[in-house]
Amino acid sequence: MKTIFLSIGFIVAMSLPLAAAGDAAKGKELYTKRCKICHADDGAGTPALQKKYGAKLLPLAGKEVQAMKDPDITKSFSEAVNHKALLKSLQPGDLDNVIAYIRTMKK
């Protein structure tokens, strides 16, 4: 009988959404200081960035970005040429915090 209860408990636990790895409040602070200048308050990108990148610029609050797993967002950020200098200035956990904040933008 214990095996059945443990199995049910495991299945229930695995079906619950995982909590974000970062701190959204700290992420908002960092986003405001370092990301907003290009990505705008709402994550849609400034008009200049929208003009430069067009359809390649994915809104951070949009379905495509929100559907990405955190490691995929991290990889995309890390591979973006225009993020190289910013990447060097981040402290451990900063990107997790920004991603947690991006998750709060979901429409």
Image (cartoon, rainbow, N blue to C red):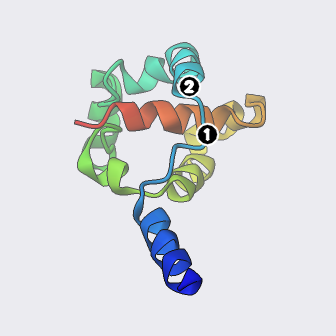
Q: Relative to the observer, which residue lies in front, 70 or 10?
A: 10
Mark 2 Cα shell of 10 Å, populated few (<14), some (14-19), many (≥20): many
Q: How many marks?
A: 2
Identify which residue is drawn at 67% across, 40% down: 84
Residue 14 to residue 71: above or below: below
Identify the disc placed on residue 27: 2
Mark 1 Cα shell of 10 Å, populated few (<14), some (14-19), many (≥20): many
Residue 73 to residue 90: above or below: below
Decide which of tag 2 and tag 1 comes sooner along the chain: 2
- Amino acid type, mark 1: Asp
- Image spot of residue 17 (x, y percent): 42, 54
Residue 9 to residue 83: above or below: below
Q: Relative to the observer, which residue lies in front, 2 or 15?
A: 2
Q: Are marks 2 and 1 in contact (CB under 8 Å)?
A: yes
**SS state under label 2:** helix
Identify which residue is drawn at 73% across, 31% down: 90
In which image quadrant can residue 15 be found?
A: bottom left
Taking the view exactly as shown, the residue that stands out farthest to the front is 1
- Could you tell me which quadrant the C terminus lies in? top left
Q: Relative to the observer, which residue lies in front, 38 or 68?
A: 68
Distance in Å between CA atoms under marks 2 and 1: 8 Å
Residue 2 to residue 49: above or below: below
- Image spot of residue 102 (x, y percent): 43, 34
- Amino acid type, mark 2: Gly
Identify which residue is drawn at 32% across, 45% down: 58
- Image spot of residue 27 (x, y percent): 56, 25
**SS state under label 1:** helix
Q: Is residue 99 left or right of residue 88?
A: left
- Image spot of residue 74 (x, y percent): 58, 50
Q: Which residue is mark 1?
A: 96
In which image quadrant can residue 91 be found?
A: top right
Q: Is residue 93 left or right of residue 13?
A: right
